[in-house]
Image (cartoon, rainbow, N blue to C red):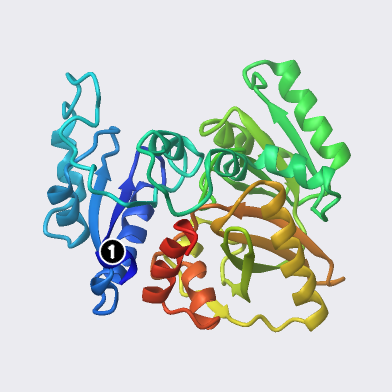
Amino acid sequence: MIGGKKKCIGLIFGGESNEHEISISSAKTVFQAFNSETNKQRFIVKAFYISKFGNWLDSDLSEKILVTEIENNTTKKQETFNQKKINFLDGIKFQDVDVWFPLLHGFNGEDGSIHGLLRFTKKPLVGSEIIGSSIGMDKISMKTIFSNLKLPQVNYLVFQNEDLNDEEVKNKLINEIEEKLNFPIFVKPSNSGSSLGISKVINESEILQALEKARGIDPRILVEEGLEVREIECGIIGKSKLITSEIGEVKYESDWYDYNSKYHSNNKIIIPAEIDSKITKEIKEIAIKSCRALNIFGFARVDFFIEKSSNKIFINEINTIPGFTKNSMFPMLWEASGLKIEQLVAKLVDISLDL
């Protein structure tokens, strides 16, 4: 036991983003891991649930959601919770927290928002700080930095705050996509996760609908050239020194790795991935270099493509709060690397404390 007493972990989950339910699933896994026989000797957990309306529940109600004593949708009745308070954290007993563990996927969480709020508590947190989280969430900013570092990426275009109701603008965007990229293409909102808002487009007639779908989530849109690729992922943990996990590959039956295939399909996970040792080494080097460039540390998952025809490596993106659900790759990668989920969550706390 470190420091002679148990460390109180403030587990924050839920949130207003479109990944609310995924956050709850991740938090349940992490909560169970902290309550393993070994970890109970070192840690206690205070849970803090944020509803879809942005309201915080106290730790007793929050814990009941994690142990499924109540359904999280009952919190719809809490719409007025804290609305009359000047400080929306009034009544939330978080003073005993020693280390924060935010598991808010998507906006108002993974984008650095929660990290900025928690800074005012002057307590350490698991994961990156504000800048790394913000850049890691924004695909356009991330890819711009990758380009400056000359890291290998698929061809892409960026459209920011374009008026899709303007016929001239629409035609301009469609023409630029057709001229500069080869089909199929992927149209993505700059800020989103779990493949939400993303469309695979195979011809010109589908472009506008895909742009509108992405713009419904974010007015800043990324359009990428689609290749025949393998989906490769690498876990990162550490602070002053970053450590890489085994490399994993996801083989999916769907046309592409969309939301349903991530969370509702029986994908084949291969860890370690069946790739050449030279490629493995290069992927790990790029993973560390990219995280360092974006000031990402604590824990993250770096996603890559390997083109099937050429074996070329392309970095795709970095996830600063990867999932901990039963289908999530991040804990699988580390279990294959020798850290079971109970050991992994404890290690992440130790990293945040520089132990």
Identify residue type, mark 1.
Phe
The 10 Å Cα crowd at callout 1, few under 14, some 14 to 19, many 20 or more, is many
Residue 347: image x %, image y %? 45, 69
Whether residue 41 is situated above or below residue 195 in the rendered picture: below
Q: Is residue 264 left or right of residue 65?
A: right
Number of numbered labels in the structure image: 1
At 51% from the left and 47% from the top, the residue drawn is 196
Residue 218: image x %, image y %? 56, 31
Quadrant of image for the N terminus? bottom left
At 72% from the left and 41% from the top, the residue drawn is 223
Q: In this orientation, which residue lies closer to the viewer: 65 or 253? A: 65
Residue 35: image x %, image y %? 24, 70
Secondary structure, mark 1, is helix
**Which residue lies under the disc numbered 1?**
31
At 82% from the left and 31% from the top, the residue drawn is 175
Give the residue at the far front of this rendering. 4
Q: In this orientation, which residue lies closer to the viewer: 27 or 354? A: 354
Whether residue 191 is situated above or below residue 150 in the rendered picture: above
Q: Quadrant of residue 147?
A: top right
At 23% from the left and 42% from the top, the residue drawn is 95
Residue 241: image x %, image y %? 64, 63
Whether residue 230 is situated above or below residue 353 in the rendered picture: below
Q: In this orientation, which residue lies closer to the viewer: 298 or 327? A: 298
Whether residue 323 is situated above or below residue 278 in the rendered picture: above
